[in-house]
Amino acid sequence: MSNIILTGVIPEIFADRKDLKSDVWNTDLRFEQGKTYLIEADSGTGKSSLCSYIYGLRGDYRGKIELDGHNIKRFSTNKWCDVRQSQISILFQDLRLFGELTAMENIQIKHRLSKIHNKRIITAWFEQLGIADKINTRIDHMSYGQQQRVALIRALCQRFNFLVLDEPISHLDDRNSDIMRDIILAEVSRQGAALITTSIGKHMNIDYDKRLSL
C-alpha cells in the first residue's frame, strides 16, 4: 500500500458546521508512503476519530477514504485483518493494552503474527526506553508513561506501510521523547513507511514533510 487518500471526509458530528477551518476535514488530502506528517489539533476536533477512520474502526463520517484507490467502506473483515497485520500499525491514545498481562506478553500478542524482530531487538528497545526492568511486570502495575512506551514497542512489532501514532509522547519527558523519536524514525526508515502522528501540543522534534492543522 503506497497511499491513503481522503476526499471530503468529515465526521458526521461536524457535518453541519459552517465555521470549520481544517487542513484535513472536508478537503482532499493524500498521505504517501515514505513521508512524515504531523496533525496538530485542539482537543475535541476529531484527532482520535481520524485515526480510527483510517484504521477502519469507525465509519461515522461523510466523504471517502481510499487505500491505494480502494474505498475502505467496502473492505471485508478478511481484508481489514490483512491491512492491520501488514500495512497499517497504530498506537492508540488510550493504548489498549491488556492490564492483566505483562509488558512482554502484550507485545508478543502482536509480534507472533509476523515475527519480524528477534527478542534481542525488542529487549534493546526496552533498554533504550528505560523500562528494561518492566519486561515481566503486569501492565496495570506500570505508570502511564511506561505503558505508553510498551504500546509503542508493540506498534513497531509488525510490518507496516503506514505508522499512525495518536499523541505518542503525551506522558513522556523530553529525554524519553527523543529516544522514542529515534527508534520510530529508524524503524519507519527500515520499512520504507510513512509516519502520521497527532498532537494537541507536545510533539516529536522531527523535520516533518507536512504539518496539518485539524
Image (spheres, rainbow, N blue to C red):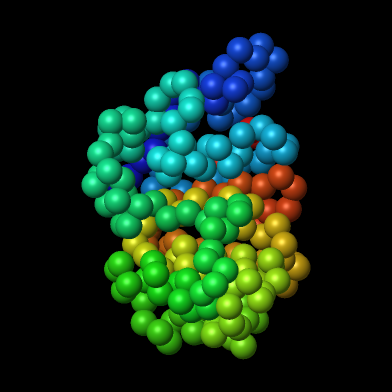
**Residue drawn 65% across the image and 81% down it:** 130
Compare residues 29 and 146 and report the one nearer the observer: 146
Is 149 drawn above or below residue 85 in the view shown? below
Q: From what the image shows, is residue 84 above or below residue 140?
A: above
Say which of 88 and 207 sits in front.
88
Answer yes or no: is residue 27 visible. Answer: no
Answer yes or no: is residue 214 visible. yes
| Residue nearer the viewer, 78 or 179 | 78
131, above or below 51, in the image: below
The quarter of the rendered structure image containing the C terminus is top right
Residue 63 in the image: state x and y as whole percent: 44, 21
Q: What residue do we see at 59% from left, 82% from top?
A: 137
Outermost residue toward the front?
100
**Residue at coordinates 62% horizontally, 77% vertically from top-left?**
129
Q: Residue at x 55, y 37 (%)?
A: 49
- What percent of the width, then of the height, locates residue 210? 56, 41
Q: Quadrant of residue 141?
A: bottom right
The answer to whether residue 140 is above or below residue 24 is below
Residue 127 on image: x %, y %: 58, 84
Could you say where residue 203 lies in the image, as x and y percent from the top left?
68, 54
Number of numbered discs overlaid on the protein picture: 0
